[in-house]
């Protein structure tokens, strides 16, 4: 029995009846359709190791063939890859004979081959940074420069800031640098500076892991008030709200396409576990239950009992009333809640608009129009157009019902 050399997982190895290797695919990057396309090409004999080897034997000067074969062997971690990458450099030192797509950008065959060989030189020596320094000097705009600096930084921490700068959209690179700086005081000032720059460019969307490591640097530097800004009382609320939005959005996607109701229900239950007292979360969970036909669950978490608990909150009552009135369900309680909101604060245009909406859905058109006119009267200019449009819709429906 022949033993097949598999050095990485996952590896898909295609062999013939004679155990001769035809092709292989190593590693996996989503989506799965990409892998299926590659396997279909293998079945058709396109760019397989076998076909590329045969092409290489016929024309050893074809740069594209040599490069594709080198990439195949690179996935198997064999020395043949390095020999072939060196051949690419010899055949096309100027980088004029082709490029390929690398992480959404075009990279020349020669540039990639040189990067792989420079990394190998560095990892073999472990003490000489010159091979990779020469690469980034030669290709300062290369999408590979960030990776080159990262390889350098593992051995020489002073290169972390260049690694981060070379990979501006990679949060992983940033938090690795920050965690490194926590152990190396000489790196802290620059690490904090780069992280604060990213914070200023995206104040509400900074990666939570970056926040955690930046907060640690602040604590090490005796700036606990800055750590509080990142991971203080609002952090839990912000992250909880973000998770609720993500769960709701994903569940709403499946509900829209009328698929996987069990996932929709699971998301609603998760939302309630995460934020049981949050009115907005209850509202979103109730919406999900309604979409999968579980109205009784919606009433359980966002029904009359909810209104009773929030009987002194006009905002919550208004939201509750509109939720049920828009669905023409639970109308008696929805109208009562809308009236209570106006009773609590009759100076708020939105409360009158909510009452008008509930009255409209109960077919009390005259009362609805009076309430909407009051909303128009109290509203600021940005709201008036919306309220006037609703008033027109109520009038038109009343006329149709005559």
Image (spheres, rainbow, N blue to C red):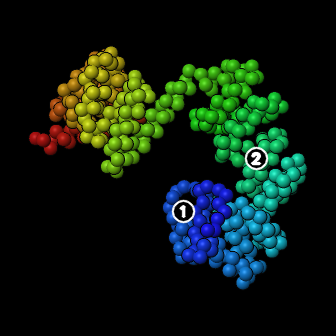
Q: Residue 87: which quarter of the image?
A: bottom right
Instruction: Tell me: residue 365, above or below residue 133.
Output: above
Q: Which residue is mark 1?
A: 35
Q: Earlier in the sequence, mark 2 or mark 1?
A: 1
- Quarter of the image with the N terminus in it: bottom right
Q: Residue furthest front?
A: 1
Res 27 seen here: yes
| Vertical placement of residue 351 versus 245, above or below | above
Give the camera-side residue of 368 and 102. 102
Image coordinates of residue 32 in percent, x first then y, are 51, 58
Numbered mark located on residue 324 in the image: none
Q: Is residue 99 left or right of residue 9?
A: right
x and y, in percent, of residue 23 in the image: 61, 70
Image quarter of the C terminus = top left
State the SS at label 1: helix
Label 2 vs label 1: CA separation? 28 Å
**Mark drawn on residue 150:** 2
Q: What x and y, as percent, mark residue 287? A: 33, 36
Task: Tell which of 328 and 123 is nearer to you.
Answer: 123
Residue placed furthest toward the bottom? 58
Rendering quarter of residue 354: top left
- Identified at 72% across, 84% down, the residue is 58
Secondary structure, mark 2, is: helix
Q: Say which residue appears at 55% left-offset and 23% top-offset.
A: 234
In the image, residue 329 above or below residue 51: above
Q: Is residue 125 left or right of residue 191?
A: right
Q: Residues within 10 Å of mark 2 (few under 14, many from 20)?
A: many
């Amino acid at each position: 029995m022949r033993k097949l050399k598999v050095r990485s997982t996952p590896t898909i190895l295609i062999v013939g009846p004679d155990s001769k290797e035809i092709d292989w695919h190593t590693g996996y990057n989503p989506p799965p359709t990409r892998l299926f396309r590659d396997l279909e090409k293998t079945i058709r004999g396109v760019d397989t190791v076998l076909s590329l080897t045969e092409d290489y034997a016929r024309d050893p000067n074809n740069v594209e063939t040599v490069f594709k074969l080198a990439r195949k062997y690179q996935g198997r971690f064999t020395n043949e890859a390095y020999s072939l990458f060196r051949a690419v450099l010899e055949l096309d030192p100027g980088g004029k004979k082709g490029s390929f797509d690398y992480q959404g950008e075009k990279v020349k065959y020669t540039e990639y081959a040189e990067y792989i060989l420079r990394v190998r030189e560095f990892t073999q020596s472990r003490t000489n940074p010159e091979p990779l320094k020469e690469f980034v000097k030669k290709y300062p705009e290369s999408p590979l420069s960030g990776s080159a600096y990262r390889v350098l930084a593992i051995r020489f921490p002073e290169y972390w800031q260049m690694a981060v700068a070379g990979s501006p959209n990679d949060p992983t690179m940033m938090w690795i640098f920050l965690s490194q700086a926590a152990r190396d005081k000489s790196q802290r000032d620059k690490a904090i500076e780069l992280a604060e720059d990213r914070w200023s460019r995206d104040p509400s969307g900074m990666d939570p892991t970056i926040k955690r490591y930046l907060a640690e640097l602040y604590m090490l530097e005796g700036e606990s008030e800055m750590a509080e800004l990142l991971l203080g009382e609002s952090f839990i609320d912000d992250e909880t709200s973000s998770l609720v939005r993500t769960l709701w959005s994903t569940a709403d996607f499946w509900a829209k396409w009328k698929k996987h109701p069990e996932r929709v229900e699971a998301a609603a239950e998760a939302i309630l576990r995460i934020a049981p007292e949050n009115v907005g979360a209850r509202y979103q969970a109730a919406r999900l239950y309604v979409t999968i036909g579980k109205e009784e669950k919606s009433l359980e978490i966002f029904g009359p009992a909810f209104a009773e608990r929030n009987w002194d909150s006009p905002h919550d009552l208004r939201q509750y009333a509109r939720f049920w009135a828009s669905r023409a369900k639970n109308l008696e309680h929805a109208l009562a809640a809308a009236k209570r909101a106006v009773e609590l604060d009759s100076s708020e245009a939105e409360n009158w608009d909510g009452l008008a909406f509930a009255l409209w859905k109960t077919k009390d058109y005259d009362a609805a129009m009076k309430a909407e006119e009051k909303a128009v009267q109290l509203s600021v200019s940005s709201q008036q157009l919306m309220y006037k449009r609703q008033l027109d819709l109520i009038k038109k429906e009343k006329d149709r019902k005559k």
